[in-house]
Amino acid sequence: MQNILIVDPETDFLDWAQHQLTTPNTNVTTTTTADEGFKIYCKETPDLVITETHLQPFSGMELLARIRQRDASAMVILTSAFGTTQSVIESMKLGAFDFLRKESLPFNLKPVVDAALTSQAEMRAATAFKPQLTVEQHQESIVGQSPAMQQVFKMIGRVAHSEAPVMITGESGSGKELVARAIHHYSNRSEASYLAINCAAIPENLLESELFGHEKGAFTGAAVQRIGRFEQCNGGTLFLDEIGDMPLPVQSKILRVLQEGEFARVGGNATLTTNVRIIAATNRNLEQEVADKRFREDLFYRLNVVRIHLPPLRQRKEDIRLLAEYFLQKVSFTRHLPRIRLSEEAVRVLEAYPWPGNVRELENTIQRASVLATTEVLMPKDIPLGMTSAIQETAPNMISHSAELTVEGAIELLLNRALADSNVQLLPWLEREFTLYAMKSAKGNQVKSAKLLGITRATLRKRIERYNITKELTIQ
């Protein structure tokens, strides 16, 4: 006989859940308070505990902590109608089997309970991580309630306490560095240094010096000794952004650090040691880079111990409203601006846009709309999407000068507009518009469209997916 304990303040939910889970081989006990739930657990040691996060006289998170302190192999599932990013991450760090939002329970409760009970013997045999219960509250910076992002939060909670390297993949602007910071924040290294370096932003001849440091006189301009990031970050976490752009010679030295914990400064003979956790990120397909001999296979396997993939914003549209409202509040608070809200029409416009620049583009768009807003409610016309506003401002000039405007002149107009506004993302907009124009000209024929654009059909299909170009758009 399997025993399940459910702790929830709502008696209607308890009745429903008890009915759903009770079987001839499963007994379900219920209670409405955390202290009574802990007493029942200590007395009966049920096989599984399902607890709401909002309880009295202490929280479900505290109940989880007490149960896991008593039994490191205890199986606990947390539920909440208002699961925040921090609560999801914290619950997984404390050892919860899963975290479920209340609205998903009609579909997910039974399968997750079955999985928890099936995994019980294995979980009891495992050595549990003893969490630090004094982690400071901090303002949430990763926002999302979509199933894909919930999985990301759970992965952060699971890997934070380990020392394994983490590879974060995802398109530009999807929030890879925020994930890296969250992993560091919830790790045992949270009190030590966190440093980030963009491997694509530093010239090849300087990257090695940035990472490992150099001795005085090591090369022209090396007037003094420089301490590199691996020394500065000893005991902490080093985030290597755009790792796919790292030159091969530097890759070899990174591999040595990962294998031996040793390195030498540029121009130096001394072997130095460091204890750094590496978190890497890339928007490239590293498997293809390895196949093309542009990335070391051995380094790839060293870095790819744990992989967290961030989905593009267009694949989690249910997060767009939440993110937009979060950024509105953030702008109002940090810039002391009047509180602004989104109209339903503006939300629909935001959700229909493909967001080639992902969350970063959305934040920039909301910031610009907030600064330029003349009313307390943002309407569709107030939302500067990608290059839309640039074209709206540039088009009259192009039309009025159409007789003498050359291709070079049109490009110059667009470039000048882009240079005047750092939020304008010219290339993603142009790529989408040219793809859409080619599809319209070819009446939706992908072979003809790819030929017109001078790209392969596979590349065209990726663009169609990336920019959410539907069949309806190509026949307008």
Image (spheres, helix red, strand yellow):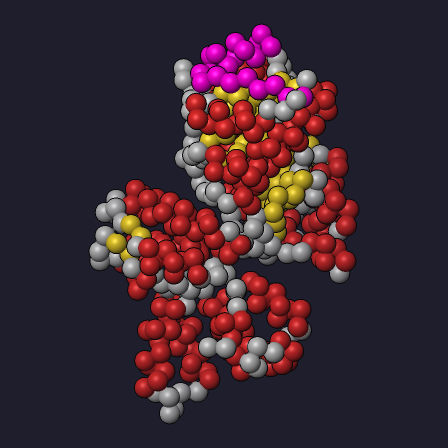
- Left or right: residue 198 versus residue 57 is right
**Residue 47 x, y percent position in the rendering:** 64, 19
Percent position (x, y) of residue 317? 47, 53
Query: In the rendering, at what x and y percent does residue 154 appear?
Result: 57, 36
The residue at the far top in this view is 43
Q: Is residue 299 left or right of residue 471?
A: right
Comparing 273 with 38, the one in front is: 38
Quadrant of the image occupied by residue 159: top right
Query: Is any atom of residue 348 visible in this view?
Result: yes
Given residues 332 and 208, the one toward you in this image is 332
Farthest residue, direction front: 24
Q: Residue at x 34, y 87 (%)?
A: 401
Q: Name the residue located 57 percent from the left edge and 48 percent from the top edge.
A: 310
At 61% from the left and 29% from the top, the residue drawn is 113
Q: Position of residue 234 (x, y in %)?
A: 60, 32
Instruction: Tell me the magenta residue range.
Output: 25-44
Instruction: Tally the numbered discs.
Output: 0
Is 393 drawn above or below residue 305 in the view shown?
below
Q: Is residue 164 magenta?
A: no
Quadrant the N terminus occupies: top right
Residue 96: tell me if it is visible.
no
Note whether 366 is above or below 98 in the view shown: below
337 to the left or right of 148: left
Q: Which residue is located at x 46 percent, y 50 percent?
A: 318
The foreground one among 437 and 203 is 437
Q: Residue furthest bottom?
A: 403
| Residue 41 on the magenta segment | yes
